[in-house]
Structure formats: structure tokens, C-alpha cells
Image (cartoon, helix red, strand yellow):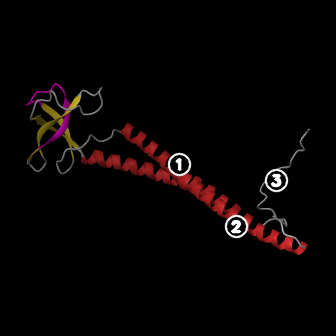
Amino acid sequence: MARAPCARVRCWRWRRNPLRRRSDVVEAWVILAGWLLALVGGLLAGLAAADAIERSADRQRAERRTVSAVLVEDAKGKVPARTAGDPRVWATVRWTAPDGSIRTGEARVSATSPAGNRVTVWIDQSGHLTAEPLTDGQARSHAAAGGVLVATGVGGIALAAVSVARFHLSQRRMEQWAVEWERIDTRWGRKSG
């Protein structure tokens, strides 16, 4: 049996007709505002996040510097710094801070380094050990990834809010229909259900 073709009515919530309810118009505006917020808000939030990550990487590069440190103990037999493929281990080093004081701390060094060997470590402005700052390429990739994640998150939150609003509007519409059917049934002299 062949099915009759159904005409798809586009933008029906915006057109004037006697069956359109106020909640239909509100729903149309909620959908439009939600999509605009998801697209524009997500784009702006993503760009802002990427810019913040780039500025943070620039600040790290400006504030951090390398100093020469002396290995206080042999690095052999120490705990690996990262995964099995990383040849570095954590060992105690000693360096001179910018204020002239002698400091010690744990840094990643080659696993074969003997005590007294010179290594290069990164310090911040106050002379504390810190991680190496991001390179330009790493900063760009972190900024791109962070921007995409923030944009996706903001867009997803906006669309989730639209779904919640549509659900509540639909529930309200169903309650209104139930009240109207009840009124029509009592006018006809019978009760449905």
C-alpha cells in the first residue's frame, strides 16, 4: 500500500494560524536564541580560552629561565620520572637562586648521571624549580585544543538548556490540552478515559 506524501511545513511556529499557541511562539524564540547562543557564544568563549592559554604560555616563557645545577646524589637506581620509555629519573639537585641563596630540590635528570654532574634546570622568578615552559608550537596546539573544548562545552550547555526549556514547554502544552479536552468532553456530556 502506497503512503500518501506529507507536506513538510517549515517555520510553522512563526506563521499565523488559528492552531498556533503562545507556547509555540515562545518555543520558536527559545530555539532561535539557543542556537545563536550556542554558535556565537561558543565561538567567542573558544576564542577567549585560546587567547588566555596563549597569554599564559607567553607569561611562562617570560618568567622562567634556565640555571645550571649540580647533582647532589647519583641518579642510578632512582624512581623513573615518567613512563617506561623516559630515560630520566628524579634526583636531588642544588642551584643558586636569583637572590644568591643556595637551594635544593628534585629535578628530572639522566638516569646515568653521577653525583657532582652539572644539569640544566628551569626556575621561576622566585628561584623555585618549575617545569619547562611551552614552546610556540605546543602553546598553539594547547590553545587550539582548549578553544575547541570550551567552544564545544559552551555550545553543548546552551543546547542542553534549550532542550530543558522545550521539555517544560511541552509539558505545559500537554497540561493545557488535557484541560481543554476535559472541558470539551464535559460539554458533550461524557468523560474520556
Identify the secondary structure beneath mark 3: loop
Quadrant of the image occupied by residue 23? bottom right
N-term mark: 2 or 3: 3
Q: Residues within 10 Å of mark 2 (few under 14, many from 20)?
A: few
Counting from the top left corner in percent of width and height, residue 148 is at 49, 45
For the residue marked with disc 2, what is the amino acid? Arg
| Residue pointed to by mark 1 | 152
Do labels 1 and 3 touch, CB within 8 Å?
no
Q: CA distance from mark 1 to mark 3?
A: 31 Å
Disc 2 is placed on an element classified as helix
Question: Within the magenta stretch, is there residue 116?
Answer: yes
Q: Is residue 118 magenta?
A: no
Q: CA distance from mark 2 to mark 3?
A: 23 Å
Secondary structure beneath disc 1? helix
Q: Residues within 10 Å of mark 3 (few under 14, many from 20)?
A: few
For marks 2 and 1, give the one nearer the viewer: 2
Q: Which residue is mark 3?
A: 9
- Label whose residue precedes the other's in the sequence (2 or 1): 1
Q: Nearer the viewer, residue 125 or 35?
A: 35
Q: Which residues are magenta?
A: 104-117
Task: Decide: is 152 above or below 109.
Answer: below
Quarter of the picture holding the N terminus: top right
Look at discs 2 and 3 and give the one toward the viewer.
2
Which residue is at a point 58% across and 55% down the rendered structure image? 160
Q: Are marks 2 and 1 in contact (CB under 8 Å)?
A: no
Residue type of the residue flagged with mark 1? Thr
